[in-house]
C-alpha cells in the first residue's frame, strides 16, 4: 500500500497541489469535538499541528496568538490555524480559561466531549501533522489564521462537516480511518478556497495555481522535473511571452522560474533519499543532472548539506525517534467520564 496521501498512480493529469501534499504526507492524527454549555473557556497550547475548526452550532470567540483581534465564530463557519499557535476558544473571553489537556490528557480519537451539559456550542476539530519534513513549503504561504465565513465557501465545506458528524455520532467499523480521510479532503477544500479567495493579493506557489497560465507551467515542471526546461518552453506552456511570463511568475510565486524548479527537484530528491533505495547517481539522473557532483552541488546549496549527509542525519533522527517511543499497547475503549460541576463526557 502506497504511503503517500494521494496515490500518484490514480491521477489522470498532473496536479501540483496533490504533488505537494503527497510529499508532505499529512496525517489527521486527532479528530473529535467539544459540546459546551454555560460559560466556558478552553485554552490550547502551541503545537506543531495544522489545526482545523468547524463550528456546527452556536457561537464562540477565538483568540489566537499572533493575531491582533479575537474573531467571533458563528454556526457554519470554519477556522484554520496552519502554524499551530496557542489559542483560546470561549463563550466569553472574560471567563478564566481551562487547559483542555488538563481535563483530558489522551487524544479525542473521534469522540465528542460534553462540557457542563453541552447544548450551547458544538465545534469539531481535525489536527494534522506531516510525515514529510518540509511542511514549511505549505505553512510559509499561509497566514496564522484563515477564517472561512463566506456563505458559498461554507456551503462547499458543509458536506464534509455533515459526513464527519455522522461518523462521530454513529461509530462504525472503519470509522476512525474514514474520519481521517474526510478531514484530509476538508484540508484540500480549505486550501482551494483560500488560494481562490486570495488570488489577487497572495504571493506563493499556492496562489499561482489559481492562475491558469502559471498553473500550466508549474504542472509541466511537476510532470517532468528531470526535463531541461527553459523559460521559453515554460512560457509557451503558459501561453505568454518569455519576458511577461518570467515577470509574472516572480511576482506571483515570489521566486524566479528556475529557482522554483530547482527547489522542487531538491524536495523530490530529499524524499527519494529517505524513502527509496535508489542510488544517488540514479536520483541525480532522474532529476536532470548528468553528474552526481553537479547534483550534489545543487542539493547542498538548496538543502544545506550533501545528499549523503542528509541521509545520515535522517537515519539518525529516525533511530532516535524509534528508540524513544514506548512499547505499543492496544488501547481499551475509555468509559464515559462524569466530573462534578463541570461534567466532561465522551459521547
Image (cartoon, helix red, strand yellow):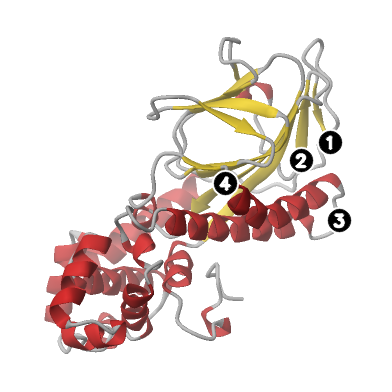
Q: CA distance from mark 3 to mark 4?
A: 33 Å
Mark 2 closeness class: few <14, some 14–19, many ≥20 residues within 10 Å: many
Name the front one of labels 2 and 4: 4
SS at mark 2 in the image: loop
Q: Nearer the viewer, residue 305 or 50?
A: 50
Residue at x 33%, y 53% (from the top left corner): 202
- Look at the numbered discs 2 and 4 and tell me whether their residues touch, using CB distance below 8 Å: no
- Look at the numbered discs 2 and 1 and tell me whether their residues touch, using CB distance below 8 Å: yes
Q: CA distance from mark 4 to mark 1?
A: 31 Å
SS at mark 1 in the image: loop
Q: Nearer the viewer, residue 71 or 35?
A: 71
Residue at x 80%, y 42% (from the top left corner): 332
Q: Which residue is mark 1?
A: 347
Q: Which residue is mark 3?
A: 172
Q: Residue 271 at x, y = what percent?
A: 37, 69
- Which label belongs to residue 235? none
Amino acid at each position: 500500500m502506497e504511503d503517500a496521501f494521494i496515490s500518484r498512480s490514480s491521477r489522470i493529469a498532473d496536479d501540483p497541489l496533490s504533488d505537494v501534499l503527497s510529499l508532505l504526507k499529512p496525517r489527521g492524527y486527532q479528530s473529535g469535538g467539544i459540546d459546551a454549555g454555560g460559560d466556558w473557556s478552553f485554552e490550547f497550547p502551541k503545537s506543531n499541528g495544522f489545526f482545523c475548526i468547524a463550528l456546527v452550532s452556536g457561537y464562540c470567540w477565538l483568540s489566537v496568538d499572533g493575531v491582533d483581534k479575537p474573531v467571533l465564530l458563528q454556526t457554519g463557519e470554519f477556522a484554520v490555524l496552519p502554524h499551530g499557535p496557542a489559542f483560546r476558544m470561549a463563550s466569553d473571553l472574560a471567563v478564566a480559561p481551562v487547559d483542555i489537556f488538563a481535563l483530558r490528557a489522551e487524544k479525542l480519537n473521534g469522540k465528542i466531549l460534553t462540557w457542563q451539559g453541552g447544548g450551547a456550542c458544538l465545534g469539531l476539530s481535525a489536527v494534522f501533522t506531516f510525515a514529510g519534513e518540509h511542511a514549511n513549503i505549505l505553512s510559509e504561504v499561509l497566514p496564522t489564521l484563515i477564517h472561512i465565513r463566506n456563505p458559498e465557501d461554507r456551503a462547499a465545506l458543509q458536506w464534509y462537516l455533515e459526513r464527519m458528524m455522522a461518523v462521530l455520532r454513529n461509530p462504525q467499523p472503519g470509522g476512525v480511518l474514514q474520519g481521517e480521510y474526510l478531514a484530509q479532503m476538508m484540508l484540500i477544500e480549505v486550501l482551494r478556497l483560500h488560494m481562490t479567495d486570495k488570488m489577487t493579493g497572495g504571493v506563493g506557489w499556492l496562489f499561482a495555481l489559481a492562475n491558469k497560465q502559471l498553473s500550466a507551467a508549474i504542472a509541466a515542471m511537476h510532470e517532468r522535473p528531470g526535463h531541461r526546461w527553459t523559460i521559453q518552453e515554460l512560457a509557451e506552456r503558459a501561453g505568454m511571452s518569455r519576458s511577461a511570463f518570467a515577470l509574472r511568475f516572480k511576482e506571483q510565486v515570489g521566486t524566479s522560474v528556475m529557482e522554483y524548479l530547482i527547489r522542487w527537484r531538491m524536495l523530490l530528491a530529499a524524499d527519494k533519499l529517505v524513502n527509496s533505495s535508489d542510488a544517488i547517481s540514479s536520483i541525480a539522473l532522474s532529476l536532470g543532472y548528468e553528474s552526481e557532483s553537479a547534483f550534489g552541488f545543487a542539493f547542498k546549496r538548496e538543502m544545506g548539506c550533501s545528499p549523503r549527509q542528509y541521509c545520515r542525519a535522517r537515519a539518525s533522527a529516525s533511530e532516535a525517534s524509534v528508540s524513544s517511543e514506548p512499547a505499543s499497547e492496544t488501547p481499551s475503549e475509555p468509559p464515559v467520564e462524569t466530573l462534578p460541576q463541570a461534567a466532561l463526557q465522551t459521547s
